[in-house]
Amino acid sequence: MEAGGAGVWKGRRCWPEKSTLYTLYLSLIVIFSGCGFEALEMSTGKIPFLEAVNGSDVLIPCTYFSCIGIKNLYFKWEFNDNGTMEKVLESVIPIDHADPMGISIFRERVEYVGTSKDNNVSIMIWNVTFEDAGRYTCFGKNPKERGKNHSAHFMLYVVDELRVVDNTLTLIIVSAVGGCIALLMLFTLLKNFTIYVLDKIKEKNKECLVSSSGIDNTVNSLSGSRVASKATPKKA
């Protein structure tokens, strides 16, 4: 038996190595599924930040997605404590839609509230304090994808009370724009009405001119007939 290139010679046939077949398998899945090469993706939502009141309970979301599924997906939460990454929680999900094995929590008042059915690995922080404010990182690593990993970040702000947003300027702008639109519509209506009235006046004037012309022609015809009859000499 001789080895050559990416395959193994067995008699007259060349069998590809397992690594080559696995790479080809992944490539086909990536092509036909429309996924990128970095298939594993962690996400903390479209709005990755939150302003919470001191003492409230806060949900920090995170979901994962993989084109080819997961196997022993390792995930963890970390907290950036003034430049030092502090581990908050970690666990492993064996397969798709399975519960995590052995969840380890390293921070007080933190609870895992995720559901593997929805690819959800979110956490809840109970009774948040100002010390909980900062950036949280949701990290995932999928051995099924040759160790592909991905991270998503979430920023938590903690305040004494929620700020009241002053909408005065917004209302003024909306009112001004609405007023301009109303004036424009009114101007357009008046313009169309004026054009309509002028057209009707023109049509009325044309009718009057036609009628007057007809009357004048009739009068002239009658006058001509009378003159002609008077000028006819009497027979002797």
Image (tube, rainbow, N blue to C red):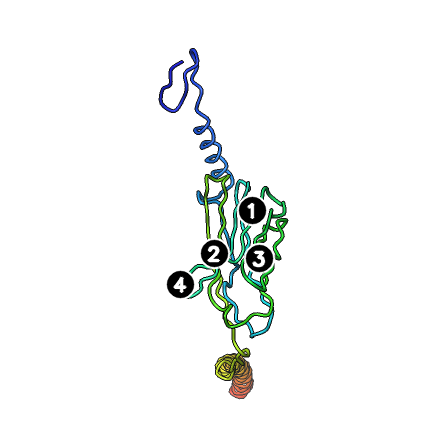
Which label's residue is closer to the chain start, 4 or 1? 4
- Is residue 38 something one can see in this rendering? yes
Q: Quadrant of the N terminus?
A: top left
Task: Provide residue 111's location: percent of width, then percent of height.
Answer: 60, 60
- Secondary structure at badge 3 equals loop
- Secondary structure at badge 1 equals strand
- Secondary structure at badge 4 equals loop
- Marks 2/3: CA–CA distance: 12 Å
Q: Residue furthest top?
A: 11
Residue shown at 55% from the left, 78% from the top: 162
Front label number (3 vs 1):
1
- Marks 4/3: CA–CA distance: 23 Å
Residue shown at 50% from the left, 43% from the top: 142
Looking at the image, which is closer to me, 205 or 154? 154
- Secondary structure at badge 2 equals strand
Task: Provide residue 83's location: percent of width, then percent of height.
Answer: 40, 63
Could you tell me if the residues under marks 3 and 1 are in contact, i.e. CB atoms within 8 Å?
A: no
- The label number, if any, that marks residue 92 in the structure image: 1
> Is residue 2 shown left or right of residue 235?
left
Which label's residue is closer to the chain start, 2 or 3? 3
Disc 2 residue type?
A: Ala
Residue shown at 44% from the left, 64% from the top: 81
> Is residue 235 shown left or right of residue 3?
right
- The label number, if any, that marks residue 83 in the structure image: 4
Residue where numbered disc 2 is placed: 152
Residue 65's place in the image compared with 9, above or below, is: below
- The label number, if any, that marks residue 122 in the structure image: 3
